[in-house]
Each structure stands twice: as structure tokens, then as C-alpha cells.
Image (tube, rainbow, N blue to C red):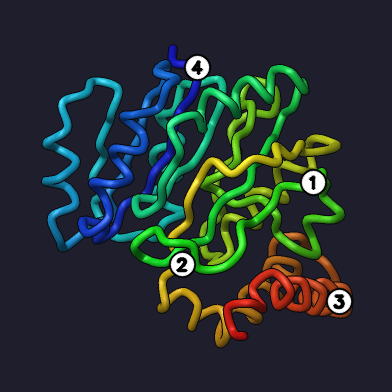
Amino acid sequence: MPEVSIITPCYNSGKFLDETIQSVLTQNFTDWEWLITDDCSSDDSVEIIKKINDPRIVLTVAKENGGAGHARNLSLEKASGKYITFLDADDFWEPNFLKEMIAFMKKEKAEIAYSNYARCDENLNPKIADFNADKEVTFNNLLKTCRLSLLSSMYDSERVGKEFFPAGSKREDHVMWLNLLKKIPVGKPLNKTMAKYRMHSSSISRKKTNIMKDQYLVYKDYMHFSTLKSWYYTINWALNGFMKYSKMFN
């Protein structure tokens, strides 16, 4: 059984896959399995992945397109590692990501941990300031802003169990983290930059238009809060999000 399971959804990511693959293969911690689910890509993503000659990599091709959360769940069902971590098919880890995260979790006896990550353009050049893991994460403070990013976070599945992504939510990562933090008191921050997140122009545009409604439903439909309480947290989330990304619009 591997120490860590890496969960990756893939959809038409052929343009970036080579860099993502190399960032995993060059990790200086090697006791991992990489579970990749392709979500019915129409580009050459599957062919790129199949060319990798490494028995630690397991590719699943979904029967139908179900979105990133569904693809992650298909991989999670097969995951056998003590630690669970996530890497989208267009993101990037520094070579010491796995080693330092696992060592930090063991030292701190943490059930969830997260690190800094660089916020980059599509060529992995810095776009705005790094996101800093400078605060402990609890259920209550995660309601107002999602400080846990999939590409720079890890949790101990032996201690907290696997947590699957909810069907139907466009903010499935936030819901998943909130459900995990219902089980534990705190997630620990490792204030060191060890990952790179690609900020695509299309995702930025979506955040400015449709995401408020999706975030409201996180509280109303998945946390089962009242309408007033759901709007309270949605407004707080929006204000915190503006501060988080405000340099983008300067």
C-alpha cells in the first residue's frame, strides 16, 4: 500500500500535461500512486498519459463526462494511500512537495495540512502574489473563505476517512473541505510555496459572473443553513475573495 494517493481529474489538458507529469515523476518522495481519471477528453490527453511507463500510475477513462468532482470520486474509490492529495492536470508541484507535506503532517500530527502556492499565468509565470498558508483552518473560518486549495493540500485518510465530492455542486471542492472539517478541529498551515496554480482567463471570467449563486448554494443546499445565514456567509466569502484576487484587476 503506498504512503500517498494522488488524485487527478483530466479533461482536454494535453497542452499542459507534460509539465504536470514531470512535476510528479520528479518528486523526491517516491512511495505514491497516481490515480488519473480522464473525463472524456476530445484532445490527446489519454494518449499522453498512456505513454508514461510507470506502474504507479493508474488511468481510468470515464464512460461519460461527469465533471471534475465525479472524475475525482472515481479515482478516490480506488485510492489506497494513507494520505490523500490532489493535483489537477494543468497544475504543478515543486520536487519536494510530497516529502515536505508528509513530514510536516507527521511532525504536527495533523489530519489536514496545506501549503503556499504560486498563482501563475498559463506559462507558469507569476501573475499575482503567492497565496500564503498563514492561518490554521477550521470549519467556522472556512465558511467565510476557502483557504484550502486542492493542489496544495493533503489529508490523512486513515484518521478521517475518505471524503468524496458532492454531486451537483459547482463548488464541490469547498463543500468537500467543509465536510472534512466537520470531523476535525483544525487544519495546519505549512508556510512554504511548493506548488504552482495556472490561472486561466476563462476561469477568472466565470468567477466575476456566475459564482456568487454557486457559493450561496454551498451554504443553502449542502450546509443546510437558513436563507439569511446563507447570504451572510456568501457576502463574507465574496468580500474575502475580492481581497484575495484584487491585484488581478489593478
| Residue 71 percent across, percent down from the top left | 38, 49
Q: Are marks 3 and 1 in contact (CB under 8 Å)?
A: no
Q: Are marks 3 and 4 in contact (CB under 8 Å)?
A: no
Query: Element at badge 1?
Result: loop
Q: Quadrant of the C terminus?
A: bottom right
- Disc nearest the viewer among 2 and 1: 2
Q: Could you say whether the residue bearing mark 4 is in a helix, strand or loop?
A: loop
Which residue sits at x=54%, y=31%?
Answer: 84
Q: Earlier in the sequence, mark 2 or mark 1?
A: 1
Circle 3: element type: helix
Residue 137 badge: 1
Q: Earlier in the sequence, mark 3 or mark 4?
A: 4
Q: Residues within 10 Å of mark 4 (few under 14, many from 20)?
A: some
The reply, left or right, for residue 127 in relation to residue 38 is right
- Identify the mark at residue 212; answer none if there is no mark: none
Q: Nearer the viewer, mark 3 or mark 4?
A: 4
Of tags 3 and 1, the one toward the viewer is 1
Q: Residues within 10 Å of mark 3 (few under 14, many from 20)?
A: some
Q: Nearer the viewer, residue 217 or 102?
A: 102
Q: Which residue is mark 3?
A: 232
What kind of residue is marked 3? Answer: Tyr
Q: Which residue is mark 2?
A: 199
**Distance between the Cα atoms at labels 3 and 1?**
19 Å
> Against 129, is 184 above or below?
above
Quarter of the view holding residue 158? top right
- What's the amino acid at mark 2? Met
